[in-house]
Image (tube, rainbow, N blue to C red):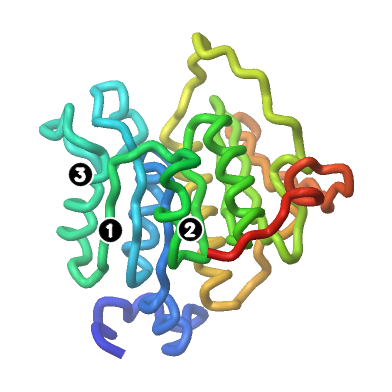
Amino acid sequence: MAKATRYIRNLAQQGLSLEEQDKLMNAKILIMGAGGLGSGVIMSLSALGVGELKIIDGDIIEESNFNRQIIHKYRSINRAKVMSAKDWVSEFNPDIKVDIEKVRLNENNYLRIIQGYDIIVDCFDSYDSKYFLNEIAIRHNKILIHGAVQGFKGQITTINPEKTGCLACIMEKPMVNDKEVFASLSPIVNTISSMQALEVLKIVTKRGVPLYNKLLTFDGFETETKQLCYTKSFTCEVCSKAPKFEI
């Protein structure tokens, strides 16, 4: 395995085996969003040594992003987030291959975007985008690691179409007023994004227990986590009725 020195603390006692590290270095992960959650996921996966990242985001950097989007620099205001993210990864771990697209996910481009990736990390901040991504994952049998943050609270689950229910089984898509802006606080965002990266680690290495059919919630006020168990709903409009397509 190349670059063993870089990952020596991954491989220390109670850490990863050489085989598990090698699996990470050969993994390909699709990250949807390069904002708050995306920043944390990108940082953690780059440190772990994931071999290939594809980052999708259609936005540019604004000054209001800096309270939680920690990979971006102030000098990059008005620059595409995906370009800034690629630069950060290249400087931090030049061995990682990074593919980027400055686009918004839609029905016309998603097939091309997900091609070749079996694990998708949901770092979107829009519930419309999250539920659309959930439908894509179910339709095309992709593992989806969902994360969301609102104020002092966050949640995460891992959706595996072959083994679990989906986001629509857990809850109906909330009716969000576009004029409402909820806080995104860096300690909460970083907590949830770290858990998302941990789910990637467990799935790639096949070690540990992913959050299958479990919604983990985190309350920053109480520093408290809870797990809500769920199952596939046989009346779900997405995972029980949607046809499956291969790409």
Residue 38 in picture, x, y percent from top left? 40, 45
Residue 67 in picture, x, y percent from top left? 33, 28
Q: Residue at x 39, y 37 (%)?
A: 104
| Residue type pointed to by label 2 | Ala
| Residue type pointed to by label 1 | Asp
Q: Residue at x 37, y 69 (%)?
A: 50
Answer few, some or many: residues within 10 Å of disc 3's Cα (few below 14, many 20 plus, some between 14 and 19).
Answer: some
CA separation in Å, label 3 and label 2: 20 Å
Please state which of residues 125 and 69 is positioned toward the viewer in this rendering. Answer: 125
From this view, report whether residue 159 is shown above or below residue 93.
Answer: above
In what element is the residue under mark 3?
helix
Say whether residue 156 is left or right of residue 82.
Answer: right
Give the mark nearer the N terminus: 3 vs 2: 3
From this view, report whether residue 88 is shown above or below residue 188.
Answer: below
Residue that numbered label 3 is attached to:
84
CA separation in Å, label 3 and label 1: 12 Å
Residue 188 in picture, x, y percent from top left? 50, 37
Choose mark 3 or mark 2, whichever is in front. Answer: 3
In what element is the residue under mark 2?
helix
Choose mark 3 or mark 1, whichever is in front. Answer: 1
Q: Residue at x 31, y 90 (%)?
A: 1
Give the mark nearer the N terminus: 3 vs 1: 3
Quarter of the image for residue 77 reads: top left
Give the mark nearer the N terminus: 2 vs 1: 1
Please state which of residues 179 and 109 is positioned toward the viewer in this rendering. Answer: 109
Return the mark for residue 197. Answer: 2
